[in-house]
């Protein structure tokens, strides 16, 4: 069975020529939305649809997309509210020290001494750097910035992250 990962949600149409307004959750819209890229549209109660990107541009906080064979507002209106996903096969290889969200979430977090801190439950993009939210037992969540001084090692095979908790981060 193929795994799919969220790229963005179609929140509205834009104009009358078949453009849709997408609220993206991808770090690389230029890769995901390049011409001829294949995305799969999902909406509860509907069959998934494979869409081929024919155009992309950015407008304010949105990505505007056009798809092959969807030439007017009437064609794209039914897509509003659906989620665009990329299949696992279409994920590209990343640079060293780059990770997909689905690879990070759920990893065990330990400090330099090997003490268990918790598990990564979410990643927030802040602009400057990502923040990894670590869920801990009987304590409030710990927010760790994704910087070299804090995230020392990410071992996907061992499913663990080694961290250095800087003074003031755990207050």
Image (cartoon, helix red, strand yellow):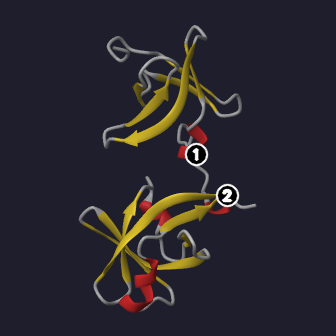
How many marks do you count on the picture?
2
Mark 1 or mark 2: which comes first in sequence? 2
Q: Which residue is mark 2?
A: 3
Q: Quadrant of the C terminus?
A: top left
| Relative horizontal placement of residue 103, taking residue 15 as reference (left or right) | right
Judge the density around disc 1: few (<14), some (14-19), many (≥20) Cα neighbours within 10 Å.
few
Q: CA distance from mark 1 to mark 2?
A: 11 Å
Q: In this rendering, is residue 134 above or below 21? A: above
111 or 33: nearer the viewer? 111
Q: Which mark is residue 161?
A: none
> Where does the image place residue 28, in percent across and percent down from the top left?
45, 56
Q: In this rendering, is residue 98 above or below 7? A: above
Q: Which mark is residue 102?
A: 1
> Where does the image place residue 86, in percent across and percent down from the top left?
57, 63
> Where does the image place residue 57, in percent across and percent down from the top left?
34, 72
In the picture as drawn, the residue positioned furthest to the right comes out as 1
74 or 104: nearer the viewer? 74
Q: Name the residue rendered at 46%, 78% in the picture.
A: 79
Element on which disc 2 rests: loop
Q: Quadrant of the N terminus?
A: bottom right
Q: Are marks 1 and 2 in contact (CB under 8 Å)?
A: yes
Q: In this rendering, is residue 96 above or below 68? A: above
Q: Quadrant of residue 58?
A: bottom left
Q: In this rendering, is residue 107 above or below 91? A: above
In the picture as drawn, the residue positioned furthest to the left comes out as 60
Judge the density around disc 2: few (<14), some (14-19), many (≥20) Cα neighbours within 10 Å.
few
| Relative horizontal placement of residue 81, taking residue 101 as reference (left or right) | left
Q: Name the residue rendered at 40%, 41% in the picture.
A: 124
> Where does the image place residue 46, in percent across and percent down from the top left?
58, 76
């Amino acid at each position: 069975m193929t795994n799919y990962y969220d790229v963005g949600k179609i929140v509205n149409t834009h104009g009358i020529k078949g453009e849709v307004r997408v609220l993206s959750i991808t770090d690389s819209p230029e890769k995901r939305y390049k011409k001829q890229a294949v995305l799969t549209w999902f909406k509860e109660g509907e069959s998934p649809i494979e869409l081929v990107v024919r155009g992309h541009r950015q407008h304010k906080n949105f990505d505007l997309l056009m798809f092959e064979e969807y030439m007017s507002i009437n064609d794209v209106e039914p897509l509003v509210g659906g989620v665009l996903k990329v299949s696992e096969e279409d994920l590209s290889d990343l640079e060293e020290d780059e990770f997909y969200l689905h690879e990070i979430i759920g990893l065990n977090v330990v400090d330099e001494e090997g003490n268990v801190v918790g598990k990564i439950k979410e990643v927030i993009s802040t602009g400057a750097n990502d923040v990894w939210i670590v869920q801990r037992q009987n304590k409030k969540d710990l927010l760790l910035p994704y910087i070299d001084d804090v995230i020392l090692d990410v071992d996907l095979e061992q499913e663990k992250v080694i961290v250095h908790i800087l003074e003031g981060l755990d207050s």
